Image (cartoon, rainbow, N blue to C red):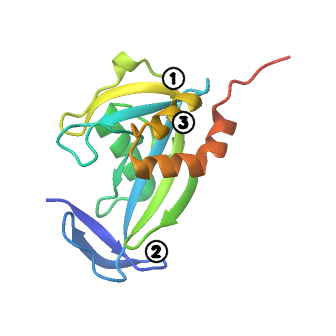
Amino acid sequence: MEWNDIYDENRRLTGRVHQRGTPWNPGEFGVVVCVWVYDGRGHLLLTRRAKEKSFAGTWENSGGAVKAGENSRQAIARELFEETGIRAEPEEFEFLDTDRDRNMFYDHYCLCRRIRLKDVVLLPGETDGVMWASFGKIHWMIRSGKICKIIAHQFLRQEKALRVRNMPKFRF
């Protein structure tokens, strides 16, 4: 059983908790974190959602819900490790932005890591594939429905910020 802290519409902790998988009441909010791992050479790390999950077989970035007692940065470090085996300290993640829907705040981060695909450790029941994808390939995957629609929308909103961070630095 997993519990999440409940926030108000101004993202202040209410002191109450919510059981994951149950409906949120009006005016209650949780926090979800997402991270784009990039290699500094123009590629983003994508994982494929396992067949047991919603949106099975679609590609996404790593992320998940913030557990009760965690802050956003602690949660993204935990989620990335759980889903890929990639370790990073909470302060290593670069904050991109936050947005909100009916009952959730979404914190978006990025992290530069050069890691071999064979070193990625997938979490059974969560992920069953991994790849490095160029920006062009991600656009093709969005057009062909291979990336989860929610993640596609997020990518398109953050693409410019990701490109600035993820292009090779040339020395003259």
Q: Quadrant of residue 22?
A: bottom left
Q: CA distance from mark 1 to mark 2?
A: 34 Å
The structure residue drawn at horizontal position 53% and vertical position 61%, both measured from the top left corner, is: 98
Name the residue beneath numbered marker 3: 139
- At label 3, the amino acid type is His
The secondary structure type at the circle numbered 2 is loop
For this rendering, which residue is in front, 64 or 3?
64
Percent x, y for residue 51? 19, 38
Name the residue beneath numbered marker 1: 114
Percent x, y for residue 145? 40, 40
Mark 3 vs mark 1: give the one in front: 3
| Residue with the most extreme right position | 172
The structure residue drawn at horizontal position 39% and vertical position 63%, both measured from the top left corner, is: 31
Name the residue beneath numbered marker 2: 11
The secondary structure type at the circle numbered 3 is helix
Screen quadrant of the N terminus: bottom left
Q: Earlier in the sequence, mark 1 or mark 2?
A: 2
- At label 2, the amino acid type is Arg
The structure residue drawn at horizontal position 58% and vertical position 32%, both measured from the top left corner, is: 135
Judge the density around disc 1: few (<14), some (14-19), many (≥20) Cα neighbours within 10 Å. few
- Asked if the residue at tag 2 contacts the one at tag 1, i.e. Cβ–Cβ closer than 8 Å, the answer is no
- At label 1, the amino acid type is Arg
Percent x, y for residue 83? 31, 37
- Asked if the residue at tag 3 contacts the one at tag 2, i.e. Cβ–Cβ closer than 8 Å, the answer is no
On the picture, is 112 further left or further right than 45? right
Query: Residue 94: in sight, yes or no?
Result: no
Q: CA distance from mark 2 to mark 3?
A: 33 Å
Q: Quadrant of residue 88?
A: top left
